[in-house]
Image: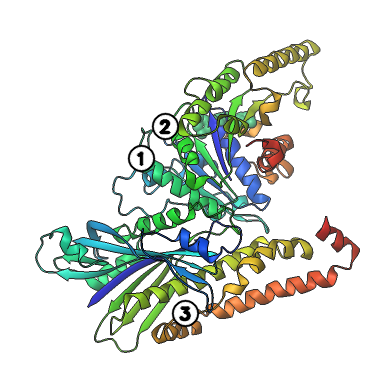
């Protein structure tokens, strides 16, 4: 299965959430990989705490795999085994029964690019080969309408990938600006659906394969807010109600949502993986955050949640 | 000295079960009008017609010395047991004096040969081919080989259901023909990054087909062992209940166990090379031990199946 992570705006929590979701899947025993297709700012290395790839690698990352003009020597894209290469001690103890957790980093000196037939061909080959190996490949795209998004829409429309399930997660914050932006990225002009249909996808099937993820959400009823005055809570509830109505008008409402990640103090402070240890032993992260990541990782694989896709 | 370089990629065919011979022929028809060769014994096997691609590139020796190479790479694909797909690429390097490229007709008359224009460091080129990072490959052999895999995997006759998930294996090989060499010497290594490399030294060149058969057979069995070990790892023996582990071991029983037949289709030369490899690293020894482990798990699960809790696990 291929999972594409997209967002209209930058800084939505797309990368952090995605990294944590693949981490949860690996812990549950799936073989998973994370492809950093955010060519302008590949940051997944820092979330997984890979010391020498924090901002991408110097040579052989995904950007050069797709675009190196020296066609002849191209072999494979560089991969980094997170279990053995992370600087975080708790990650280096791979639990028994866990699956592979592999990072395909971007390049330090990457950058966005335009339509390219050869890049498309290589992209198809990459997805085909990785699907042979991994239960789930998560592809982190750059924010907004990038060529990377068009590229993967064209790649997944290629007959070579006809047997491969492809699903989309569109991340947005739970705010008045982010909700219309997320809807626009999917349904609007030059949005995922329009570009996808141009690339050869069936509109309804593609639409059913796109779901939304709300990030850094403040729940008015949560225990963290128990210190608020009743008037403040009432006001927060109103805002939340307002946002829910807004989401419904933009077709980003409940039935289109696959996950909601609460605002987490650790993530607010730093982009990182949240281990069980952070919740249980150190008591710094919220268990509801980890549960949300786990739930998202499970629902990604539940076909009934993606009917029609 | 003559140098023959090659690469073999091995993977599971994108099809839910073994495919019938007719499908295999359709999937492997790489060259229009040329026949796919098939045989049923001792194991079902089909091999594509040869296909070629032209190259004009820089070939680097380990020392960093560069030479221009012009000619053609030869590729072929094969399918064993209707399940395991292998694509091979090979080229014989022939140093020629003078630094000028000839007309293409010249190279087309010598398919599968790449002429190196000028002084060529043969052992150094072999070493560079074998030790190169996975992201690069001599003369673009890896890209050509991977392209063939991709082409066959998307064939419309395949149902696109993978029987099991394993990483494609890449085996790079170099055969140095050295008249002074005594007995053929073969060295098989699995690198830390997973790449397999084989260095073969022999006195007489023999037919290219014999070499290809040997290296493909080695790559096939190395892949089978790799796939088996990966299924065993994922079966979570000792973590799960035996009945659950057995369910996870099933792909090995369905798709792998019956394919182990080392050197079954090889000539005398290939058989002797296999024999040398069996003493070290001893692929068959590890295979047998792994198969025994699977059978033990199955026996234990069967013995426990009459106990209620186990039964519930198995049939839930
Ligand atoms: N659930 C959350 N609670 C609090 N903060 C969060 C949460 N999720 C993400 N963040 C924080 O938001 C910031 C942006 O996250 P991240 O880098 O993942 O976003 P992004 O969408 O990938 O951004 P970009 O478009 O720049 O790649 C980070 O500082 C991150 O730690
Ligand atoms: Mg990001």
Q: Residues within 10 Å of mark 3 (few under 14, many from 20)?
A: some
Q: Is A64 positioned to the left or the right of B293 in the image?
A: left
Between the residue at mark 3 and the residue at mark 1, the CA separation in whole angstroms equals 41 Å
**Tag 2 subunit:** A
Residue B56 picture location, percent across and down: 22, 56
Residue B185 appears in the rendering: yes
**Residue at mark 2: C-beta within 8 A of ligand 1:** no
Could you say which is closer to the camera, residue A12 or residue A166? A166
Q: Is residue A303 above or below residue B239?
A: above
Quickly name the residue at label 2: A147
**Quadrant containing ligand 1:** top right
Q: Indicate the secondary structure of the residue bearing disc 2.
A: helix
Q: Foreground mark, 3 or 1?
A: 3
Q: Are marks 3 and 1 on the same chain?
A: no
Mark number for residue B265? Answer: 3
For the point 35% across and 85% down, the residue is B184
Q: Are marks 3 and 2 on the same chain?
A: no
Q: Indicate the secondary structure of the residue bearing disc 3.
A: loop
Residue B249 picture location, percent across and down: 68, 65
Between the residue at mark 3 and the residue at mark 2, the CA separation in whole angstroms equals 49 Å
Q: Is B273 positioned to the left or the right of A265 in the image?
A: left
For the point 56% across and 71% down, the residue is B225
């Amino acid at each position: 299965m291929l999972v594409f992570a997209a967002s209209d705006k930058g800084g939505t929590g797309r990368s952090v959430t995605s990294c944590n979701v693949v981490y949860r899947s690996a812990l549950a025993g799936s073989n998973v990989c994370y492809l950093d297709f955010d060519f302008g700012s590949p940051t997944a290395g820092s979330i997984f705490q890979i010391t020498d790839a924090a901002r991408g690698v110097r040579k052989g990352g995904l950007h050069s795999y797709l675009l190196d003009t020296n066609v002849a020597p191209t072999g494979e894209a560089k991969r980094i085994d997170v279990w053995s290469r992370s600087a975080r001690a708790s990650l280096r103890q791979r639990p028994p029964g866990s699956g592979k957790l592999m990072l395909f980093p971007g390049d330090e000196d990457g950058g966005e690019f335009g339509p390219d037939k050869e890049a498309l061909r290589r992209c198809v080959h990459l997805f085909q080969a990785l699907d042979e190996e991994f239960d789930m490949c998560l592809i982190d795209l750059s924010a907004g309408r990038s060529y990377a998004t068009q590229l993967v829409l064209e790649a997944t429309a290629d007959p070579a990938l006809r047997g491969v399930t492809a699903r989309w997660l569109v991340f947005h914050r739970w705010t008045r600006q982010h909700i219309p932006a997320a809807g626009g990225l999917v349904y609007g002009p030059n949005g995922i659906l329009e570009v996808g249909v141009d690339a050869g996808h069936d509109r309804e099937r593609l639409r059913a394969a796109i779901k939304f993820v709300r990030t850094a959400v403040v729940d008015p009823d949560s225990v963290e807010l128990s210190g608020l005055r009743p008037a403040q809570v009432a006001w927060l509830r109103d805002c939340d109600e307002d946002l829910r109505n807004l989401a419904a008008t933009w077709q980003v409402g409940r039935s289109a949502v696959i996950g909601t990640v609460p605002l987490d103090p650790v993530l607010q402070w730093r982009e990182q993986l949240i281990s069980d240890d952070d919740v249980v032993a150190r008591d710094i992260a919220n268990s509801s955050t980890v549960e949300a990541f786990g739930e998202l990782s499970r629902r990604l694989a539940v076909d009934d949640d993606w009917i029609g896709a | 000295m003559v140098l023959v370089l090659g690469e073999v990629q091995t993977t599971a065919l994108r099809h839910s079960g073994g495919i019938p011979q007719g499908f295999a022929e359709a999937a492997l028809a790489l060259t229009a009008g040329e026949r796919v060769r098939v045989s049923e014994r001792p194991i079902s096997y089909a091999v594509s017609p040869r296909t070629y691609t032209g190259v004009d590139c820089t070939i680097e020796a380990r020392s960093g010395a560069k030479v221009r190479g012009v000619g053609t790479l030869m590729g072929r694909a094969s399918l064993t047991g209707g399940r395991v797909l292998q694509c091979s690429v090979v080229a014989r390097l022939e140093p020629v004096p003078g630094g000028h490229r000839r007309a293409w007709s010249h190279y087309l008359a010598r398919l599968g040969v790449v002429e190196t224009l000028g002084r060529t460091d043969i052992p150094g080129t072999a070493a560079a081919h074998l030790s190169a990072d996975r992201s690069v490959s001599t003369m673009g052999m890896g890209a050509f080989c991977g392209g063939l895999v991709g082409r066959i995997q998307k064939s419309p006759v395949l149902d696109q259901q993978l029987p099991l998930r394993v990483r494609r294996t890449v085996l790079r090989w170099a055969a140095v023909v050295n008249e002074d060499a005594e007995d053929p010497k073969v060295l098989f290594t699995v690198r830390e990054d997973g790449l397999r490399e084989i260095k073969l030294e022999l006195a007489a060149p023999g037919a290219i087909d014999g070499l290809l058969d040997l290296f493909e057979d080695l790559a096939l069995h190395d892949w089978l062992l790799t796939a088996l070990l990966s299924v065993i790892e994922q079966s979570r023996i000792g973590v799960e209940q035996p009945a659950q582990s057995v369910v996870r071991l099933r792909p090995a029983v369905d798709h792998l166990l019956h394919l182990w037949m080392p050197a079954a289709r090889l000539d005398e030369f290939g058989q002797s090379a296999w024999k040398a490899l069996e003493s070290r690293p001893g692929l068959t020894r590890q295979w047998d031990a792994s198969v025994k482990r699977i059978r033990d798990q199955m026996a234990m699960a069967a013995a426990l199946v009459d106990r209620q809790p186990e039964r519930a696990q198995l049939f839930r």
